[in-house]
Image (cartoon, grey):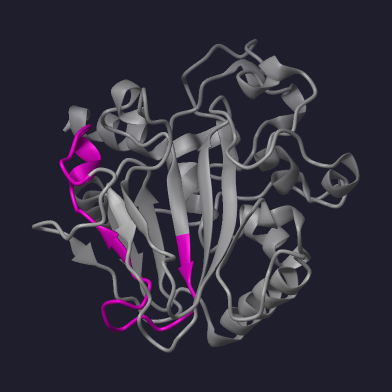
Amino acid sequence: METDQKYRIAPPGFTQEQWNTFNEDGIIFIEDAISDEDIDIYKDAIDRVAESNPKYTQGGYLGMENIVERDPVFTELIDHDRHVGYAYDLFGELLKLHQSQFFLRPPGGKQYNQWHPDGARALPYGVFSPNLPLQIKIGYWLTDLLHERMGNLVVLPGSHRQQYMNGYDTHKSLPGELIVCPRKGTMTVMHSSIWHRVEMNDSDVVRYNIFVAYCPSWVTPADRFHSSKDWLETLNREQRIIMRSYSHAYHNAKPPASDFPLFLERDSGSEKDDEMYLDHVQLHRRKRQTMHERITSINNLN
């Protein structure tokens, strides 16, 4: 749904401290990012969508993908100011929603998974992008997981820099692993290449959480081929762009002029990088620096 509203300023993203930690560990934790009110809204939406799934049984495990198309509450996450700025810092004007998921992990059963990185296996993202991720995953933690064996995420900090690890395809505990025990309302930002697994849930608590992953537009999406045209018409401008549901394949690499700018620059409010091009170069044909590039340029000058 197109409007005459002005372009949006890019929402907040990484602080310098967060960026340093993200590069070092491959994951950052932002506590109290999600209000109790919003937690209830998200959990109600998960229950609502779960109950509409004929394969779901009350009290059972469920993981669902492409959730942004399943409920308006999840649709709002496509470009939510709470987190989309982190993705924009990395992928800039070619930002795309890679995947959206929720998980219900109840007590008991075998609903855990083995050590793995996200993304491609035979030719992982890190081969082409050893310094920056080609996907980041935002985690919304909607349940207190204050102890081990509650269906916790387990990560190996710093492992986003290694292509191989002996624990791959096993569930065994490894030296240096971090069992994530977040309070509800915590948000995580995770590098796609960090090695991670999920513990069994031996508690009496159902783990609720949402993941929203982003990538550059030229990386293939993980949970859809194309979105419904009728549904796309209900979106705001930024949401529609970020979904990248193009009818011409090459638009994933070279989006149409109408998709620029996605956001205005956070500090200056500009739609373009100054003094990079002569005036005749059209906006959609210009490269724009990402946050990482700007930091690198400043550090090189110093």
Magenta span: predominant SS is loop
Q: Residue at x 44, y 29 (%)?
A: 289
Q: Name the one closer to the observer, 166 or 96.
A: 166
Q: Position of residue 39 (x, y in %)?
A: 57, 80
Q: Name the one closer to the observer, 281 or 191.
A: 191
Q: Is residue 148 magenta?
A: yes
Judged from this view, the residue extending furthest toward the bottom is 204
Q: Name the one closer to the observer, 55 or 211.
A: 55
Q: Residue at x 78, y 50 (%)?
A: 236
Q: Position of residue 211 (x, y in %)?
A: 51, 58
Q: Residue at x 54, y 86 (%)?
A: 36
Q: Quadrant of residue 243?
A: top right
- In the image, 239: left or right of 30? right
Q: Position of residue 168 (x, y in %)?
A: 25, 43
- In the image, 192: left or right of 256? left
Judged from this view, the residue extending furthest toward the right is 230
Q: Quadrant of the C terminus?
A: top left
Instruction: Establish if 17 lies above or below 179.
Output: above
Q: Quadrant of residue 204?
A: bottom left
Q: Is residue 298 magenta?
A: no
- In the image, 45: left or right of 162? right
- In the image, 265: left or right of 43? left
Judge whether residue 95 can be spotted in this image.
yes
Instruction: Establish if 23 lies above or below 277.
Output: below
Task: Read off the magenta span.
Answer: 139-167
Judged from this view, the residue extending furthest toward the left is 175
Q: Position of residue 173 (x, y in %)?
A: 17, 60
